[in-house]
Amino acid sequence: MTDAWNDFRRFEEMMNRMFEEVWGRPGRRLLLPSGERGELVPAEHRQPSIDVVETEKEVVATAEMPGLEKADIKINLTEDRLEISAETKHEEKKEEKGYVYRERRSGSYYRAISLPSMVDPDNSKATYNNGILEIKMPKTEIKKKKPLKIE
């Protein structure tokens, strides 16, 4: 296992050097592809873990997105694609005699996936509870092929 871990570390270092040669030193805002279609998104975005389950009638996507408020999350849905993004900023400040305590946190999520079946975006529903986003998307009916006569 140690050899595999060392190989992985060497690969990571090689990739870091390559990115620095192409885009410059860390600290500069980088854009990296995300999702299957290669959209460019800022590199500091975290990709939430997503489970996608397909049943006979619907596709259900469940994403882990802890630390967010419902209003922070944006969902874009088409018949064949789901896109989830979120950005949050939090600042806490406490002042007591002799010191000031201030803490800032910010974070963002982005994930785009192709869906396994065509869905109906208009009748889809999303819920967010305890850091878990669940999106239920009813499948559209598959239309039967109709032969077309050539005139």
Image (cartoon, helix red, strand yellow):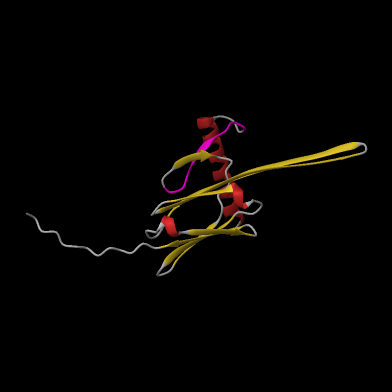
Specify the quadrant that holds the N terminus. Answer: bottom right
Q: Residue furthest bottom?
A: 56
Q: What segment carries the magenta color? A: 27-36
The residue lying at 62 percent from left, 32 percent from top is: 27
Q: Is residue 137 above or below residue 7?
A: below
Q: Is residue 4 left or right of residue 67?
A: left
Residue 39 position in % (x across, y down): 45, 41
Q: Quadrant of residue 94?
A: top right
* In front of the other: 43 or 84: 84
Task: Reply yes or no: does residue 113 show up in magenta.
Answer: no
The residue lying at 63 percent from left, 57 percent from top is: 131
Residue 107 position in % (x across, y down): 63, 44
Q: Is residue 125 above or below residue 44?
A: below
Specify the quadrant that holds the C terminus. Answer: bottom left
Residue 145 position in % (x across, y down): 22, 63
Q: Is residue 47 left or right of residue 144?
A: right
Q: Is residue 114 left or right of residue 13?
A: left
Q: Residue furthest front?
A: 122
Task: Reply yes or no: does residue 28 show up in magenta.
Answer: yes
* In front of the other: 39 or 101: 101
Query: Overall secondary structure of the magenta stretch?
Result: loop
